[in-house]
Image (cartoon, helix red, strand yellow):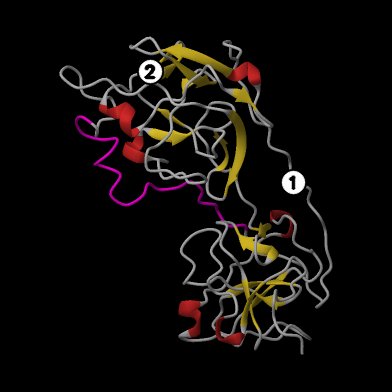
Amino acid sequence: MKTSWRSASLVASAAVVLALTTACGQDGGGASGSQNVGATAAPGDVGTIGAGAGLGDGLGAKGGQAPAAPPVSAGKLSVSANAELGELVTDGSGRTLYRFDKDTAQPPKTTCEADCATTWPPVAADDAIAGEGIDESLLGEVTRADGTKQLTIGGWPAYRYAKDAAGEAKGQGVGGTWYALAPDGKKAKAAASAGLSTRKDPELGEIVVDKNGMTVYRFMKDEAWPKPVSACTGACLEKWPVVAPVEANDTKGVVKKGLMSFTRPDGTAQQTVNCWPIYTFAGDKKAGDTNGQGVGGTWYAVAPDGKPVGAPEK
């Protein structure tokens, strides 16, 4: 494995602004929303692991305690997409790799020893393989206090989190010092999300999501032509909040025809896809949830062209 590393940067592509004329006679419009990306630690983690003494401060206790086990095998590294964190590095078993703020990258230095290294097992350098999406020149190693070699990515020593299973990132933000590793060695952080975009759901296929990755829904009692009309009012809106207007150039993967906003009777502006009013569901607690799908036989996720996904044909 290569032991040298170099810094890398991610280049974000510019969005193409598209003009449009909607099917229902109005132009798309509205103010772009702000995005809120990132993740929070699992309940009970902050203050118990990653903060405090012994296990808590992430440094490990010194003297009198048994040394931590040797670094665990890395295997073939790869880049995985996380709904909240964007791209992050996973090992050969699909486990998320992390970095520790109290370590250093220039030069590489690890400070997680003893009990800390039990909670945050260091990743071995000797068998690490750069898989797809991983720049081999960014992989290196650092010698730990016990003489074993630990993998570094962009100079940062790499760890796993003992509470994670494959595909999880529960260690993100623990103690305000532990963060998932991006492919360039920086802290994983999702790129700014479009006001409306699409994602591939394993059961529903391609569906529309809002700027926070929350599933967007249609109400079968609404109307789209000759103008949008929402049948969800009063208490209904507590469970099904309206999606605020977005600019046409603040969308990705959504069909532009009929992409517009309208004013509800209460004066609130609401976004549409193909002129159909769209909503989120209060029962969805995190990005990727689709708990609103099929509720009451009237609520369905929205396809990129505005059609209700999985709704019975009339």
Q: Main secondary structure of the magenta part?
A: loop
Q: Is residue 73 above or below residue 13?
A: above
Q: Amino acid at mark 1?
A: Ala
Give percent across and percent down for residue 207: 68, 64
- Identify the disc placed on residue 110: 2
Residue at x-position 36% and y-position 49%? 42
Residue at x-position 72% and y-position 55%? 252
Please provide the residue range marked out in magenta: 32-54
Q: Residues within 10 Å of mark 1 (few under 14, many from 20)?
A: few
- Corner quadrant of residue 115: top left
Q: Nearer the viewer, residue 167 or 93?
A: 93
Q: Nearer the viewer, residue 245 or 294?
A: 294
Q: In this figure, which residue is indicated by the disc labeled 1?
A: 15
Q: Earlier in the sequence, mark 1 or mark 2?
A: 1
Residue at x-position 75% and y-position 68%? 259
- Corner quadrant of residue 198: bottom right
Is residue 13 on the magenta stretch?
Answer: no
Q: Amino acid at mark 2?
A: Thr
